């Protein structure tokens, strides 16, 4: 089954909720313990007393990001956990961002579409963004809800801003600069999300899904990272693949 068959992420998520989930992951909490901790943390913040209420659904989203991640994101999660204790606030958001890209394809696709729209025209509306995504996700009510709530989450994280024109969104003037090792984790997340698991380095470094961040990376740093393999295609194209997926990527010959 394609990773892009279930939306899943349809809650507005505040930054301190992500921090709470990540802190439990750093502490080595089991999935059940992480869920229980988040359930208590959100008491009085998000309504509901059962798993089918807003609180239960929010706990499920947070747990999927930092707890019970897909098998393809286990290595990504470990590297993010190892970096969390020593990172800046900007880098902590970047690590959350990486985990959301690596665990929720809908988040990755929304971030990519937002990045493209911001580059093209500087602002966007929810209606235009939803139409961009309908081709791959279908024109369903759950898509509109996910778009609305993820965009509102991005506003809460201060990577998007409301504009004086109601219904339009833009981004702050300054990008969030992250260190090389956090940048490598962001690239890994993109490859986890990319079902072919290999992309040209230039495409990764300028990927629209990373629109809030400024990466300070070069080819030597990517080549030295143990989670990647690099190889040259043609005269001047460096292809990056996840180490565990190298044989699949080269055999498929798929490069976007």
Image (cartoon, rainbow, N blue to C red):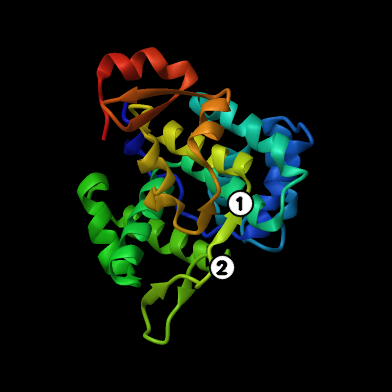
Going 64% across and 37% down the picture, which residue do you hit? 80
Q: CA distance from mark 2 to mark 1?
A: 16 Å
- Asked whether the viewer can see residue 99, the reply is no
The image quadrant where one finds the C terminus is top left
Circle 1 packing at 10 Å, graded few (<14), some (14-19), many (20+), is many
Question: Which x, y percent locates residue 158?
Answer: 56, 68
- Asked whether the viewer can see residue 9, the reply is yes
Numbered badge on residue 158? 2
Relative side of 180 to 83, left or right = left
Residue at the outermost bottom position: 164
Question: Which x, y percent locates residue 82?
Answer: 72, 34
- Against 116, residue 163 (above or below) is below
Numbered badge on residue 178? 1
- Against 32, residue 104 (above or below) is below
Question: Which x, y percent locates residue 8?
Answer: 44, 44
Q: Mark 2 or 1, which is nearer the eye?
A: 1
Name the secondary structure under disc 2.
Answer: loop
Going 46% across and 48% down the picture, which residue do you hit? 9
Going 51% across and 40% down the picture, which residue do you hit? 218
Question: Which x, y percent locates residue 181?
Answer: 62, 39
Circle 2 packing at 10 Å, graded few (<14), some (14-19), many (20+), is some
Q: Between disc 2 and disc 1, whose residue precedes?
A: 2
Q: Are marks 2 and 1 in contact (CB under 8 Å)?
A: no
Numbered badge on residue 57? none
Relative side of 4 to 153, left or right = left
Name the secondary structure under disc 1.
Answer: strand
């Amino acid at each position: 089954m394609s990773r892009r068959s279930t939306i899943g992420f349809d809650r507005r998520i505040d930054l301190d909720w992500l921090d709470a989930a990540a802190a439990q992951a750093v502490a080595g909490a089991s999935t059940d313990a992480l869920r229980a901790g988040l359930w208590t943390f959100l008491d009085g913040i998000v309504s509901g007393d059962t798993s089918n209420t807003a609180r239960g659904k929010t706990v499920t989203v947070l747990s999927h990001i930092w707890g019970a991640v897909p098998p393809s994101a286990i290595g990504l999660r470990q590297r993010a956990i190892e970096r969390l204790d020593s990172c800046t606030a900007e880098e902590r958001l970047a690590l959350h961002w990486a985990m959301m890209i690596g665990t929720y394809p809908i988040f990755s696709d929304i971030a990519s579409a937002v990045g493209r729209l911001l580059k093209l025209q500087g602002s966007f509306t929810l209606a235009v963004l939803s139409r961009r995504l309908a081709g791959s996700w279908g024109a369903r009510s759950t898509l509109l809800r996910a778009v609305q709530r993820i965009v509102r989450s991005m506003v809460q994280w201060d990577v998007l801003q409301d504009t004086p024109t109601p219904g339009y969104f833009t981004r702050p003037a300054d990008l969030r600069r992250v260190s090389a090792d956090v940048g490598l984790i962001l690239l890994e997340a993109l490859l986890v999300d990319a079902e072919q698991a290999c992309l040209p380095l230039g495409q990764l470094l300028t990927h629209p899904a990373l629109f809030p961040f400024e990466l300070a990376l070069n080819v030597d740093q990517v080549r030295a990272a143990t989670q990647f393999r690099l190889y040259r295609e043609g005269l001047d194209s460096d292809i990056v693949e996840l180490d565990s997926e190298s044989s699949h990527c080269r055999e498929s010959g798929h490069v976007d």
